[in-house]
Image: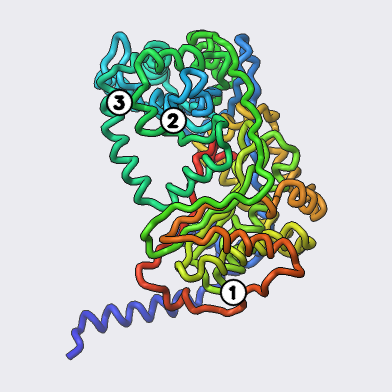
Amino acid sequence: MIKPYFLTALSGLFLTQACIADVNLESVTLDNNPRVLKSIALLQSLKSPQTAMQFNAPYVHDLKNRYKVRSLFVESQNLPIVDIQLTFNAGSARDEEVATGLHGIANMAAQLMDEGTEKYTANEIARAFERVGAQLSVKAYRDMFIVKLRVLSHPKKLEPALGMLMEILNHATFKKSSINLILSNTQVGQKQIQENPSRMMNVQFYRALYGKHPYAEPISGTQRSISKITPLQLKQFSNQFLVAQNMNIAITGQLSAKEALKLSERIAGNLKQGEKAQALPEPIDKSSFDIRHIASDSSQAHVMMGHLGTSRFDSDRLALEIANQMFGGSGFNSILMQELRVKRGYTYGAYSTFSFSQVPGTFSFSYSTRQDQLLSSVQVAHQALIDFVTQPIDLNQLAETKAGMLRAFPNNYSSNANINAQLGAMGFYHQAADYLSQYPKLLEKINAQDVQNAIQKHLHPERLTLIVVNDQLDKTALETRLKQDLNPQAAQPLPTENLPNILNPPEKEVIDLPVSFPTDAPEAI
């Protein structure tokens, strides 16, 4: 028996649907119908999908700091908040400038920065920030050492937080007891890396590419290297690199330009002045294939391949960003995904990335596949790169890629935190203050020939470094296939079967995600 209240609810539902069906959006006027949801007006815009939405980049003030410390500022009156980012040229690439072989100094300094000063304990520092609702973040990357402070703009909140920030930067003690705690935690982290194929690939990839270069070792260092770090060495790192003349300042929030300038000068003036860090050495590229194997009993074979890329200052950088999106950075539309997943079902995901640094970073792509498909999948991925370098650019794909990048561009300044991260990167890499507003124009100007030239100059399928994680690997057979790919007359036909692995995955399949490279400014365009 159907309950009466159920019939009532059901009839109400049908009545509501009928009313919705009878609504004529053309006749709706919000002024005469105050009960109508205002969102209906927005629905009207869906009838005109061709209408382009205009996004204006924020205006960036390049403040004339009297200490000659680059200071960029964006005024944002929407929230009573101020975001401050101090970006030092003091990443892990500087570790061995303090002591040879002691990788992980910058990272440890970042972790211990708020663990106590000469006047305050770690708990007192934490409570000082909590009382004013401020948030402090300190993190080391390969190039950068970044200190972030978010606090309310009212002087009664801003002043105490700023004072404690200066106390930490100038007087952190880096006590031995805190170092011992880091060592204990790192032992667990090292075990996790060994159990994670993607993490192991990433570490070995950098070591294989960079050799003795400062970028070679992990940002966190190794258990052996960090066990030798002393409070005196951490203090030396701070005194040498966490200084005014080795940083830039980014400020975003509810301040005027005059107030932001005064704030930047107070920060710069209350830090040790010091000197700029020296230029990093140029890494040496390889001239042939370099295949490295990591034995693992994983149900999947994991592959990473690539080579040295170029620096952040290269004029081809934006063209290479477009190229990377086309090759392996744009999901299902990318060439790698089409060749490895859609056509052959070798993997759930294949991704490529460029890392742009002070000196040449990396170009790489990675995926996982079944053990028995390893050699075939590597051949397909390698051939895809060769074709990408040697064949004309697909004009339709180029247009779609540029349009997608342009649509995604406003995400870079969708919040105060995003804006401030952009300002920090712009200051660090010496970009003009109007870079955000110029970016769409720069993107629009790049044509197929620009991308083709950049690809042929910077992508090298003949000298890849490969890291393979699986149970066993015949390096000779793999290198033979790679060399055959480079010689069209000797190359074997690529596999053409369309395997239904996506619909019927093997047992214990691991969905491969993009490898998270420790780059210096992941938010920066």
Q: CA distance from mark 1 to mark 3?
A: 54 Å
Query: Which amino acid type is shown beneath numbered disc 1?
Result: Lys
Which structural element holds mark 3?
helix
Q: CA distance from mark 2 to mark 1?
A: 41 Å
Judge by depth and name the residue closer to the eye, 377 or 342: 377
**Residue in the picture at 55% in, 22% down:** 249
Q: For label 3, count other residues whose C-alpha is less than 10 Å away and answer few (under 14), some (14-19) or many (20+).
A: few
Q: Is residue 451 visible?
A: yes
Which of disc 1 and disc 2 is earlier in sequence?
Answer: 2
Q: Kindly identify which residue carries mark 1.
A: 343
> How many numbered callouts?
3
Residue 420 percent coordinates (x, y): 54, 32
Residue 66 percent coordinates (x, y): 62, 9
Query: Which amino acid type is shown beneath numbered disc 3?
Result: Glu
**Residues at badges 3 and 2 in contact (C-beta under 8 Å)?**
no
Q: Which mark is residue 139?
A: 2
Question: Residue extending furthest front?
Answer: 476
Q: Quadrant of the N terminus?
A: bottom left
